[in-house]
Amino acid sequence: MQIPSKYEANQVESKWYDYWMKHNYFHSEPDEREPYTIVIPPPNVTGVLHMGHMLNNTIQDVLIRRARLQGKNACWVPGTDHASIATEAKVVAKLKEQGIDKNDLSRDEFLKHAWDWTHEYGGVILEQLKKLGCSCDWERTKFTMDDDMSEAVIKVFVDLYNKGLIYRGFRMVNWDPEAKTTLSDEEVIHEERQGNLYYIKYKILSEGEGSSKNAPQKEELEEEYLTIATTRPETIFGDTAICINPNDERFIHLRGKKAIVPICNRVIPIIEDDYVDVEFGTGCLKVTPAHDENDKNLGDKHKLEVIDIFNEDASLNSFGLHFEGQDRFVARKSVVKELEETGVLVKTETHINKVGTSERTKAVIEPRLSDQWFLKMEDLVKPAIKAVLGEDSEINLFPKKFENTYRHWMENIRDWNISRQLLWGQQIPAYYYGEGKEDFVVAETIEKALELAQEKTSNFELQASDLKQDTDALDTWFSSWLWPISVFDGIRHPENKDIKYYYPTNDLVTGPDILFFWVARMIISGYEYKDEKPFNNVYLTGLVRDKQRRKMSKQLGNSPDALKLIEAYGAGGVRVGLLLSSAAGNDLMFDEALCQQGKGFGNKIWNAYRLVDGWEVDKNISQPESSKIAVEWYESKFQKALIEIEDHFSKYRLSDALMTTYKLIYDDFCGWFLEMIKPGYQQPIDAKTLKSAITIFEDNLKIVHPFMPFLTEDIWHYIAERTPEEALIVAKWPESKPINEGLINEFEFASEVISGIRNIRKQKNIAFKDAIGFSVINNEKSHTTFDSIISKLGNLESIDYVSDAVDGALTYRVKSNEYFIPTAGSIDVEAEIKKLTEELNYTEGFLKSVRKKLSNERFVAGAPEQVVASEKKKEADALAKIETLKASLSSLH
């Protein structure tokens, strides 16, 4: 079957993906082979393919396809995450468009809308991954809200609760007023922002309780007010104390006194605590226990009243008096205006402080006191620290630099707030039977909950209808931290054949931004529920940025449409383009030109096969010596590259593995090997050389296949008729064979000789069809192994080894060897002498300037070592060039 003149990616890619799916190559079942397992970082069910997904999933597919070629039982489990906050926000927005308020719906009614949304959009990103060529085991596709996955999550919650590791507590939490839910500390991003520091006067109560008739004299005015600096004047309605440092002599006279909060005129105590920083602001602090964690700690210590002034959307409630209903930032302006009008705003200064924002909605986080569910982490985390950082560590992070980040997070871990005020997600399995804080039971089902409640209360008249389930849902990460176990049903059925065969998985590919959110937590759950690591290696990719190093985002408009890139450059072109400059852990500066380079690489391979496919074979001619040497050389060159490629893979340097492959195919195979064996114009090739060339081509396709699966599979089937069992996707990775290092080294020398001939032909316009003479003074005693190839690629009449220079010939050197090409009748000798003389004069002048610099002792002593080394190299290069030019001139005289 003749190969078409052009590779049409759009047609080829769908054809081969359908073929792979039809023959079930992606599906895995436990057998006697070594398993190789990857679980996909589940993208949000609401998501669409973006550049980060493209990079991450290309890397996973490269690893899984290589494992398949190595004969391993490759299993890549795909799936999606229900993404509570993001999905609920989208569903709420859609309902709003339809004139429906989420609050008017029952839980079941809202969940029906959420499931409708999921069924409509949930599979979009997985379908898009197929366009990229991802060879996932689609039969194993999981969703974190699948019945079996949810059952596993609830089972784990109940187990941890029964172990005393999950508790309910009234604590200061991170509140997202846009999503109207709590967030864990790790879901809060702290940003430096410029705000203001407001200096506000609080009136000190006199002994006469501040009545006008007891007003102090004018000279005592300074003692009547205490100025406090705050970045959040709208929170004064929640003030329940003023705190001074007991060691601050400025305020000793205020001990035991009280103050009046401006606007609301509430009387609050002045307390003492060395927590107060005497250097910040005015050296005293307004205490608002409901809206700051440190203030809450102070409040607990001094038994202060707690006043929550915000609604769940961060608007002021009735404690905000006439500002009730105003958004906190609107209220800030209104409060400042009134403080100014009443004369208690002393001054305003600009101030830089860190503001917590929601990772999901970007809303400014509001500290809020709330009853929430927490998971104790102090003991759970210990095996996970040892697994990565211990002397006998079992899990490797690539690159290693992320171990420091991991250490910092894990050694400073806090209890995990696992409840969310959302409807979409696994509902917390706590059932309330009374009004008291402890009037609840935790169980996997309402039937079991009823039994427990009856036992706990000794009230066997209690009915299921008397129980009310907690309305909160679990944090999405509480589902995904079980992912490597739950996708193989290892929580519900810990001894099933899949979990015993596929767990622990081999490699995890993800971004460093979820090293704690997901990776660390999976390690924790792995040791808790399997007493074993969840994976061996974690490959942490960098972020995809644009050429200006900006993070790609919709807002900046610098993120290309992933599917349009595939349409323009083919999946192979995009995959190669992404990987060419994507070292582990380092950000990728994406440039569309890289995809063009990837597409160009594919075209190079395609045209290389077209060339080979177009050769006529003659079984009656014997193999030329040049072809025999070429085959031996390339086989060794291939084997050397194969060792390099496998070393790069072992260190997760996929970009380097691709680059080694790229150079081998582009330079050594296409640039040299095919030229070496190519038959003369309209001449046939011998059968032995062609057979070797096809075998070599097939090995090349095998090492390129993980990077460019569609192109390579297509060419593979043009080479020969193949049965499904013989498809490239399940072929055998090339075997290691002995390497002839001597042959590789000899070619390096021979290639310089050939390049010298080609340069002279180009400079002197000597057509390749014209055979030329060639003589060598072999000072290097170099081998003659490649003489037949030098002769062929240079179109030489012969190669003569001589002891003296050849008169009337052009000359050049490789090391100390001197090569001569007679020029009789082929060039204008006088013009050549003039050109070489001018070049010699220029080079001698350049050498003089370099030597002047090197003779300057101050320069040599003061310049960096590499600068001096560079100048010395220039001197050596100039000397060598002068010698060659003089030899060439001598031969022309």
Image (spheres, rainbow, N blue to C red):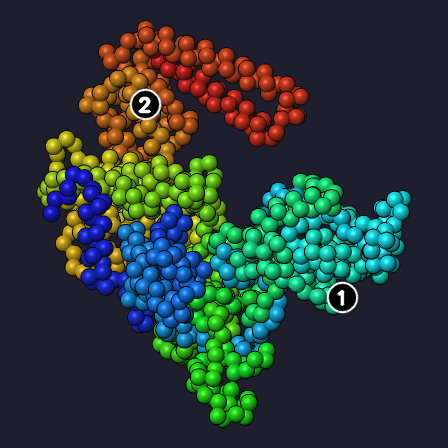
Say few, some or many: other residues with alpha carbon within 10 Å of mark 2 (under 14 / 14 to 19 / 20 or more).
few
What percent of the width, then of the height, locates residue 737? Answer: 33, 53
Classify 769 as above or below 109. above
Which of 147/845 is in front?
147
Dot 1 crowding, Cα within 10 Å, few <14, some 14–19, many 20+ = few
Q: Is residue 142 above or below residue 839?
A: below
**Marks 2, 1: nearer the viewer:** 1
Quadrant in which the C terminus appears: top left
Q: Nearer the viewer, residue 452 or 133?
A: 452
Residue 872 seen anywhere in this rendered image of the structure: yes
Report helix, strand or loop for mark 1.
Answer: helix
Which of marks 1 and 2 precedes in the sequence? 1
Residue at 45%, 75% (x, y): give it. Answer: 154
- Which residue is nearer to you in this view: 279 or 497? 279
Q: CA distance from mark 2 to mark 1?
A: 88 Å
| Horizontal relation, residue 511 to residue 121: left or right | right
Q: In the image, residue 728 lies at what x, y percent? A: 24, 55
Residue 608, position as x, y percentages in the image: 22, 40
Residue at label 1? 302
214 vs 830: above or below = below
In the rendered structure, which amino acid carries the disc numbered 1? His
Q: Which residue is mark 2?
A: 759
Of 831 and 408, which appears nearest the observer?
A: 408
Q: Residue at x 31, y 29 (%)?
A: 754
Percent of width and height locating residue 237: 67, 57
Tell me where residue 287 sits by quadrant.
Answer: bottom right
Number of dots carrying numbers: 2
Q: Residue at x 36, y 69 (%)?
A: 109
217 lies left or right of 5: right
Mark 2 secondary-structure assignment: helix
Three-letter residue code for mark 2: Asn
